[in-house]
Image (cartoon, coloured by chain):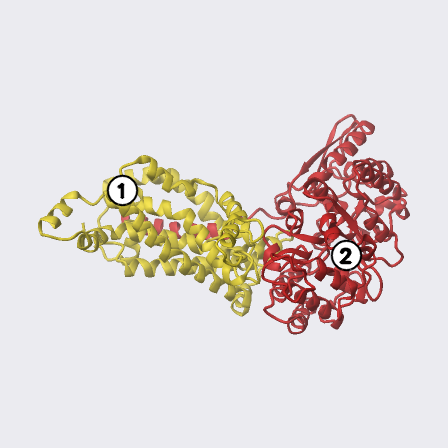
Chain colours: A red, B yellow
Amino acid sequence: MNRHLSLALVWLLVISLLLSACGGAPAESPAPAPGPDAAAPAAGQTVTINYWLWDANQLPAYQKCADDFMAANPNIKVVITQSGWGDYWNNVQTGMVAGTAPDVFTNHLAKYPEFASKGQLVDIQPQVEADGVDLSVYIGQLADLWARDGKRYGLPKDWDTIAIVYNKDAVAAAGVTEEELNNATWDPQTGGTFGELLAKLSVDENGNNGLSPDFNPARVKQYGLIINGAGEAYGQTEWSWLAATTGWRHIDELYATKYNFDDPRFIATIQWLADMMKQGYVMPLEQVTSLGGAAAFNSGLGALHSNGSWMIGEFANNATFPFGFARLPIGPEGRKSMFNGLADSIWVGTKHPNEAWQWVKYAASKACADTVGEFGVVFPAQQSGVDKAVAAYQARGIDVSAFTLQALEPGGTFLFPITDHASEITAIMSPVMQSIFLGQVDAATALPQANAQINALFQ
Amino acid sequence: MATQRSAIALTGEAVRARRPQRRFHPEAFTAFLFILPSLIGFTVFYAAPAVRGLWISFTNWDLLRPPQFVGLSNYVRLFQDGEFWNALGVTVYYVLLNIPLQTLLAIIIAVMMHRLTQSMLIRGLIILPWLMPPVVVGLIWLWLLDPNLGIVNIALKAMGLPMIAFLGLPQWAMPSIAMINIWQYVGYTALLIFAGLQSIPGSVYEAASIDGASETQMFWKVTIPLLRPVLVFVIVTSVIGSFQIFDTIAITTKGGPVNATKVLNWYIYEQAFSRFNMGYATAISIVLFLILIFVSMIQMRILRAGESDL
């Protein structure tokens, strides 16, 4: 028995190794999805709605909205929890499995189709119709982004565009005027005046700029442009604002079943950027991967940096030099920015779907948009909120017109490419884009292969 | 040390399994009572979930919808999955970068501690990196090694050397991570070996020196052979730990650049929680589990884990 026992123990011991490989105990069977009328609260009883968001900058603004909402609805208590982007999605997913996900949570366009297709989001179209919510108040096509096949998974609360943030000292030192910067032209073959500007704004340790024959691309003190990384499959702040000016789009329509990463216009754009990194005009990928582009820009390592409107506060708080926002360069088909927005979704596991809907409706209302706008942290999805946000930024001495003009320009924006298989597509594209920017492969070789792999996912 | 010793003896017995069958011993029951509490915890928190994990590996569970049985198809897919083979290769590469150097440094540090100092302060300082949470270690090194802002590159620059993107280039990323983990774990490993050194009786060294053995001869002919059971324990556990590297990578490189640090555990995590393929991820962890059993058994056989020369 002794021997048998110890043998058994040995096996139990080795099995335990499996656990650490497994990454945790598997959860119980998926949470039951109660119908819309499940567990209606008794009159006079206070209902608690748990609401999650990831942006710490927006927390005070939405807390104010929640306070106003609770004052008007004394029987509903909104409890807001904020966690960083990475943890946020883990918490939401594991919460859905374990039955502890929040009643309402801030959702992202890259994430919601997977949740919706796995039956985790409440279709709010019936409530939208019953309560007569006017979807036309939302700027542009923001409301359409959250609908699919007659179902609706969120009401828009904000939007963002891309612009160029620039170091005023560095630009002035190179003798570049703000007019030049705001009217730069670009095309993937020659790089246009934008390409020239990047060379002019790049300075090596000996003080030579990128136009000088003595410029040393291995010892660059200040890069012309910093981008955030390789951009995975979307390149929202990295390359979509260049590629889209050629007329290229990730996909031909929302929920397309085919991607366009093999398009020659896209290949030419990506190769142009990769070449600029090699020449020392754009900060090489290996230098931005650890800490990100904004940290490098805030430390004065670049003259220009492309980023989204949600980062305005980040620069205001952390830049060690005067900065401004410039318009995107004008490509063959004009200026183009990705137009993205967040919305609040209701989880199917909520015990209080009616109260959750009340909160979603309020968070996407004019009242809340105006409140959020006054905090000047993000552009709300309704015009009155945007006006308030612009005023709030102005009061802090920040001119954000590069973002708002881009949003207002006819044809100036294109939508975030929403399709199925988003996480698999990201997994395929990330290493491919990295190896192109690191100079390991040519865009023309790698991208068509990756695109074929992606399109095969839809077969 | 006592528990580690018994763990070695225990696993050693399973490998060799050549002791004669013993009769029931009344003490066995008492012994069983002693291990019962940990056995219950083990069954509830380890064994049962592990068996469940085995079941999940035969399903297509995507975390959110009910799992469906798919037989061996996860395992078939695994053999055709280039990303899996890449992850396996990257993991083995990491183990080879990590273990030999870490063990060698640990032996040197342990012998120095044994021979040169009795100071508790120094012993404490040596395990200090091990006391830090791995996440903190990862973050500290992420900043230290940053090409733009990190102090390591500022030092390189001051010496006139070119800047190196330690964690940003595929050829540098894995060696950098191996270095970070050696830095973190070498003190702990040295401490284990140091404890083993202390258990070697001084009389053996006395006898050796009476026989005229030099310091070097004593190291190779006395210290190393008598240290072997402890070394086996250290190597087997650190190889297992090394195969399961995750936290440093999760903080610093997240599997990049270009999959250069996408080790098995990161790939399992990615498949399970980013790509919603829990069934497939579990199949990979079962394979990792089998690999670890196999590697551990080979190590114990080669290093004669069940025997002691003392």
Could you say which is closer to the camera, residue B172 or residue B56?
B172
Q: Chain of mark 1?
A: B
Q: Which residue type carries mark 1?
A: Ala
Could you say which is closer to the camera, residue B256 or residue A395?
A395
Give the total of numbered labels. Answer: 2
Question: In the image, residue A313 lies at what x, y percent?
Answer: 73, 42
- In the picture, measured across the screen, residue A179 lies left or right of residue A96, that is right
Residue ID at (32%, 37%): B34
Question: In the image, residue A87 lies at what x, y percent?
Answer: 62, 45
- In the picture, measured across the screen, residue B123 lies left or right of residue A378, that is left
Task: Residue B39: tell me if it is visible.
Answer: yes
Q: Which residue type carries mark 2?
A: Phe
Could you say which is closer to the camera, residue A49 or residue A367?
A367
**Element type at mark 2:** loop
**Residue lying furthest top in this view?**
A44
**Residue lying furthest left in this view?**
B210
Give the mark toward the camera: 1 or 2: 2
Task: Residue A458: tell me if it is visible.
Answer: no
Location of residue A175 (image quadrant): bottom right
**How many angstroms separate mark 1 from mark 2 (CA)?**
67 Å
Q: Circle 1: is it few (<14), some (14-19), or many (20+) Cα within 10 Å?
A: some
- Tell whether label 2 touches label 1 (CB within 8 Å): no
Question: Label 2: which residue?
Answer: A416
Question: In the image, residue A215 lies at what x, y percent?
Answer: 64, 63
Question: In the image, residue A395 lies at what x, y percent?
Answer: 82, 36
Question: Label 1: which residue?
Answer: B28
Up-down: is B270 above or below A437? above
